Amino acid sequence: MHKYRECGLETVYLANGYAEARGESGVSVDDVEGLHRAIADELVFRKVEDLTGREFRFVREFLELSQRKVGDIAGVQAQTVALWEKRGDANVPRSADRWLRAIYRERVNQNAELVAAAQRLRELANETRPHAINVRLDEARGTWTREAA
C-alpha cells in the first residue's frame, strides 16, 4: 500500500498500479491521468462534506482551470481562490464547492452550458447601469402609469 502524497492530498492510498522507483524516493504510476480522474470522481461524486482547500485545488487543477478562471465563475478574485486553497484542511465556502462540483460534472458529461451561463451572469453583473433613477407615477382610474414629463 502506497500513501499517494504526490497528488497533494493526504488521504489517497494506492493498493496497486504503481511501482517503486529504483534508486529514487517515489513511485511510478501506471496511468496517472486515470488515477487522477478516479480521485476527482471520488471527491466530486462521493464526498458528502464540502471540499477542503487541498481537495478543491486538486479538482481545479485536474480540470486545468486557473484560480482566476474559477474566481471569475464564482464571482470572486483569484486571490480569494488562492486563500481557500492555502487553508489546506479547512473547507472552502459551500457556494464555491458547489460551483466546482457542477463544472466537473459538466466536463465529465461534455456539456459546456453551465460555464457559459456563469460567464454570462458575471458579464451582466459587470455591466454599467444607472445607480439611481427617479420613478414618477400617476394613478388615474385605478391604473398606474409613468408621469408625463
Image (cartoon, rainbow, N blue to C red):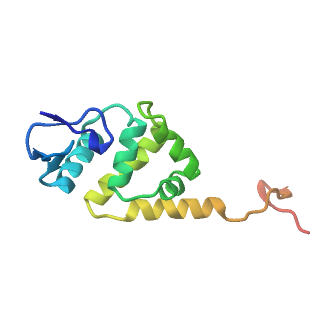
Viewed as shown, does residue 39 lie left or right of 124?
left
Look at the picture and state if 26 lies above or below 141.
above
Quarter of the picture holding the N terminus: top left
Residue that lies at the very extreme toward the bottom in this rendered image: 149
Name the residue located 11 percent from the left edge and 53 percent from the top edge. Answer: 30
Look at the picture and state if 1 lies above or below 97.
above
Query: x and y percent of residue 87 in the render?
Result: 48, 34
Residue that lies at the very extreme toward the left in this rendered image: 16
Name the residue located 32 percent from the left edge and 57 percent from the top edge. Answer: 106
Query: x and y percent of residue 23 in the render?
Result: 15, 46
Figure quadrant of residue 91: top left
Residue that lies at the very extreme toward the front in this rendered image: 23
Viewed as shown, does residue 136 lie left or right of 71?
right
Q: Nearer the viewer, residue 47 or 112?
A: 47
Name the residue located 30 percent from the left edge and 59 percent from the top edge. Answer: 107
Quarter of the picture holding the C terminus: bottom right
Query: x and y percent of residue 10 in the render?
Result: 29, 33
Look at the picture and state if 51 lies above or below 118.
above
Number of marks: 0
Query: x and y percent of residue 55 in the render?
Result: 36, 40
Q: Nearer the viewer, residue 67 or 127?
A: 67
Viewed as shown, does residue 19 lie left or right of 128?
left
Name the residue located 52 percent from the left edge and 57 percent from the top edge. Answer: 68
Viewed as shown, does residue 25 lie left or right of 57?
left
